[in-house]
């Protein structure tokens, strides 16, 4: 452990029950593994263009679910608390505070503008809590709304409003007195998993039929600009449209939770084509990428527990007309994917953590990535393009 509390190796106590024998065998194999495509590190297995730097220990075993970077501060959420780190030095994040929240699930994709922070609790109470986080060392709860059962919330128009994945629209202009102001779904409550503001007042939904909403004129009554769905009605879990919706392709994550083996219908990372959507009012999938099971030494685990599926992802800060995307894949760890100008996807590198369940990844700089791991904490990685 160094002077700021960062350790270079995760402790074995964080290995998850049934995977212990498998992972122990994998460690023995790593020493003999060829270094052509992957090499062992202190934290796991990595391709030659990915370096494992260290692990932040404070969050180990806290069942982290997501995070948000705003300026020099990194807000990390879990099922029992949220934390704030000063990441002025991205290789040595300094813990500012840990705020207990009580049981919250899933509390993924936590959102904040650096002043208020939203904690969603869809399945363990059906609440939305609003915290004042201006004092990073002492966040304070401002309000708690009952009977709000949206999977996630996104800040809209600088957090003056929030759109929930289930359709709820929350008026946050007075954050100490939030109120339910409407529902963005004309079909009633949606079985959605996420919403993402791509530019002020324009929101993309992770729903069975992906929708682009426009709430610029009236945030409480947005209208649907365009939409698109897969023929197989797959579960759509998160969406991002880089560069404020100016890219031809937006990025999509599907999910197949708790799937033990990788199959042809496992949760995929996808690109969706928007060409001509203002006239056709439709989107369509362009390409998809899935991980596979392997031998561990090839960078792929032989089986899965949390699921053979992609999870939360983020494009590189320099993403323009395609580029690199860092994506989480639970037992498959972090995968670095490139998207070309035609929307085609290919893998460029990876980090496979030992005893890990990577749920989300974030670019903190143009080469430093924080991988949020349910069991390990925060893995700090360096990606070399």
Image (tube, rainbow, N blue to C red):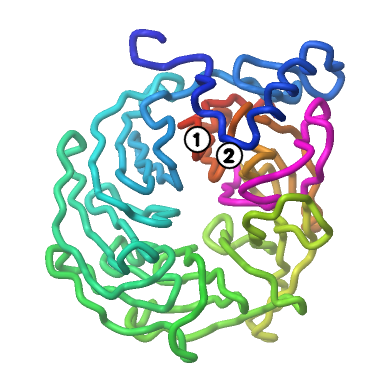
What residue appears at the point 40 percent right and 66 percent down from the top-left corner?
A: 200
| Above or below, comparing residue 159 to residue 23 in the picture | below
Which quarter of the figure has residue 83? top left
Q: Position of residue 352 (x, y in %)?
A: 68, 31
The residues bearing labels 2 and 1 have C-alpha atoms spaced at a distance of 6 Å
Q: Is residue 76 visible?
A: yes
The span picked out in magenta is 291-317
Q: Is residue 235 left or right of residue 359?
A: right
Where does label 1 land, which residue?
375
Residue 309: within the magenta? yes
> Marks 2 and 1: CB-CB under 8 Å?
yes
Q: Position of residue 284 (x, y in %)?
A: 74, 74
- At horizontal 59% and vertical 24% (from top left) the residue drawn is 382
Within-10-Å neighbours for mark 1: few <14, some 14–19, many 20+: many
Q: Which mark is residue 357?
A: 2
Question: Quick one: SS at disc 2?
Answer: loop
Circle 2 residues within 10 Å: few <14, some 14–19, many ≥20: many
Residue 322 forms part of the magenta stretch? no
Instruction: Tell me which residue sits at (56%, 29%) in the image.
Output: 15
Indicate the quadrant containing the C terminus: top left, top right, bottom left or bottom right. top right
Q: Nearer the viewer, residue 381 or 7?
A: 7
Res 264 quadrant in image: bottom right
Quarter in which the N terminus is drawn: top left
Q: Nearer the viewer, residue 199 or 98?
A: 98
Residue drawn at 61 percent across, 76 percent down? 208
Q: What is the number of callouts on the image?
A: 2
Q: Position of residue 110 (x, y in %)?
A: 38, 53
Q: Tell me if residue 340 can be seen.
A: no
Judging from the image, what secondary structure is the residue with disc 1 in?
A: loop
Image disc number at residue 384 = none
Q: Main secondary structure of the magenta part?
A: loop
Q: Is residue 72 left or right of residue 133?
A: right
């Amino acid at each position: 452990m160094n002077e700021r509390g960062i350790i270079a190796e995760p402790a074995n106590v964080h290995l998850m029950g049934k995977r212990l024998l498998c992972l122990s065998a994998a460690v023995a194999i790593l020493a003999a593994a060829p270094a052509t495509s992957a090499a062992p590190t202190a934290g796991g297995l990595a391709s030659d263009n990915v370096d494992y730097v260290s692990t932040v220990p404070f969050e180990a075993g806290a069942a982290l679910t997501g995070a948000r970077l705003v300026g020099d501060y990194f807000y990390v959420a879990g099922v029992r608390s949220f934390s704030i780190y000063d990441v002025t030095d991205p290789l040595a994040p300094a813990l500012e505070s840990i705020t207990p929240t009580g049981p919250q699930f899933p509390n993924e994709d936590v959102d904040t503008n650096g002043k208020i922070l939203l904690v969603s609790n869809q399945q363990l109470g059906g609440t939305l809590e609003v915290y004042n986080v201006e004092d990073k060392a002492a966040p304070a709860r401002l309000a708690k709304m009952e009977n709000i059962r949206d999977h996630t919330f996104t800040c809209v128009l600088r957090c003056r409003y929030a759109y929930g994945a289930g359709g709820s629209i929350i008026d946050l202009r007075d954050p100490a007195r939030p109120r339910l102001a409407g529902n963005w779904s004309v079909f009633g409550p949606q079985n959605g998993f996420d919403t993402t503001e791509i530019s002020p007042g324009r929101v993309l939904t992770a729903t069975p039929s992906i929708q682009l909403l426009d709430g610029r004129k009236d945030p409480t009554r947005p209208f649907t600009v365009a939409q698109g769905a897969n023929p197989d009605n797959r579960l759509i879990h998160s969406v991002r449209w880089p560069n404020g919706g100016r890219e031809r392709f937006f990025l999509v994550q599907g999910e197949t939770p708790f799937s033990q083996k990788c199959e042809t219908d496992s949760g995929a990372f996808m690109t969706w084509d928007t060409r001509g959507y203002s006239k056709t009012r439709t989107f369509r999938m362009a390409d998809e990428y899935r991980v596979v099971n392997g031998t561990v030494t090839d960078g792929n685990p032989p089986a899965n527990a949390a699921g053979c599926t992609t999870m939360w992802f983020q494009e590189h800060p320099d993403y323009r007309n395609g580029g690199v995307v860092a994506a989480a894949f639970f037992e498959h760890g972090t995968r670095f994917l490139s998207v070309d100008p035609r929307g085609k996807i290919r893998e460029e590198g990876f980090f496979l953590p030992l005893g890990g369940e990577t749920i989300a990844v974030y670019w903190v700089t143009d080469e430093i990535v924080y991988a949020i791991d349910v069991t390990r904490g925060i893995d700090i990685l360096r990606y070399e393009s």
